[in-house]
Amino acid sequence: MAVSIRIVFLLISLSSVACHAAAPKYMDEGWNTYVARFITNGRVVDTGNNNVSHTEGQGWAMLMAVAYDDKAQFDQLWQWTNKHLRRSSDRLFSWRYDPTAQVAVTDLNNASDGDLMIAWALSVAGQRWNNYEYSYQSLILRRQIKEHLLKTVAGYTVLLPAKEGFTHDGFTIVNLSYFVVPAIQHFAKLEPNGPWSSLLRDSIRLFEAARFGPKKLPADWMAIADGGEIYPAEGWPVRFGYEAVRIPLYFFWGRITETPGMRAINAYWREQRYPPAWVDLSSGEFAHYPLSAGGMAVRQLLGEFGVAMPTTPSSSDDYYSASLLMLSRLAAKNTFVR
């Protein structure tokens, strides 16, 4: 009888140890919720966009996994990304995956912000977990970004939104929200003789030069003429909105806060308790619905608004809103920024 009791006790103890070992080192309700709602077998699901996946989301989630020391989830995310989106031609990543299409990846073009985020996530993962392969993969990707995606236009070092489709006769299209400031800062420290410091400097210059309308806000998409003129890009709404909301997130995360551009955004967002999701910089027309919860989290980074930032995405948050919230939480803690 005593032997049986000892065996049962031993089995319970081993089970407890196994469960304890399997638990993440850093438990975070927000991250657990994000994983449960938006990640399936390493694929990040954009619930607001027909459940497609893209490099932006893969890179964001990989970075979050490092922040919360979730190596198992990171490995799944990276393996899925590398298997399904990696381009054999130049080692960049195709930007979009549609699980419902006969061919899941039909547009082979990349998205530069996704490439930047993946490279950053791989680098900090290599540092955190002392993993040479992650660091090496980041290096390979940075080389391709430098070769194919960085360009000098009218004295500015810029990041093309993608390898194809944004360089035209006489002008170049850029999206300032693709300039992931803390990632660029990280790369500049790794490669002090590389182009990253110039890209960082000109990110700040562009932010100040490319502000439009009475509120002097950045547009989602802008054009830089070869002669130096900067203006809202044709073919997109002239809005401070869905894309540009990431600009203050990334600049805050990089601790670049005391600039005219950041002050203009902060002043605009302070005008209303619930700012509209977008404003047209030409006509002044605005959305008749407010910023998402994720957009409001970015707003809270810029000042005190009397409401604490949520720690967990709500059931009503789609992928993009939840991602902005989770990234804002990391930015608020200066995660990965030294």
Image (cartoon, rainbow, N blue to C red):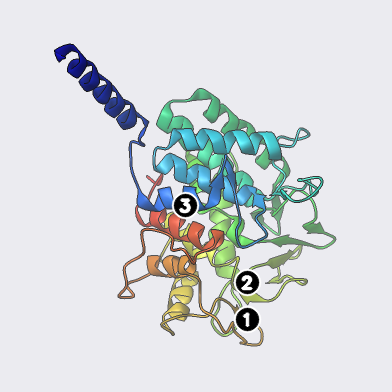
Q: Which residue is mark 3?
A: 34
Q: Which one is in front in this view, the residue at disc 2 or the one at disc 3?
A: 3
Task: Say which residue appears at 25% left-offset and 25% top-offset.
Answer: 12
Residue on which disc 2 sits: 219
In the rendered structure, which amino acid carries the disc numbered 3?
Tyr
Question: Which of the two residues, 128 or 313, is positioned nearer the viewer here?
Answer: 313
Disc 3 crowd, CA 10 A, few/some/many (<14, 14-19, 20+): many
Q: Front-most of 12 and 173?
A: 12
User: Whole-Å distance between the Cαs marked 1 and 2?
Assistant: 7 Å
Residue at left 47%, top 52%?
Answer: 34
Q: Which mark is residue 170?
A: none
> What residue do we see at 68% from left, 59% from top?
50
Of callouts 1 and 2, the N-terminal one:
2
- Residue at the disc numbered 1: 281
Tell which residue pokes out farthest to the front in this image.
Answer: 1
Q: Amino acid at mark 1?
A: Leu
Check the image and report above or below for 236 versus 156.
below
Q: Residues within 10 Å of mark 1 (few under 14, many from 20)?
A: many
Name the residue located 39 percent from the left edge and 37 percent from the top edge.
69
Question: Circles 1 and 2: CB distance less than 8 Å?
Answer: yes
Question: In the image, what residue type sits under mark 2?
Answer: Ala
Q: Earlier in the sequence, mark 2 or mark 3?
A: 3
Residue 188, how many percent across, how many down?
51, 42
Q: Earlier in the sequence, mark 3 or mark 1?
A: 3
| Drawn side of residue 110 relative to residue 314, left or right | right
User: What is the x, y in percent for residue 24?
Assistant: 36, 37
Badge 2 marks a residue whose secondary structure is loop
**Mark 1, secondary structure of its residue:** loop
Q: Specify the quadrant of the image occupied by residue 25.
A: top left
Q: Residue 316, image x and y in percent? A: 49, 67
Q: Quadrant of the C terminus?
A: top left
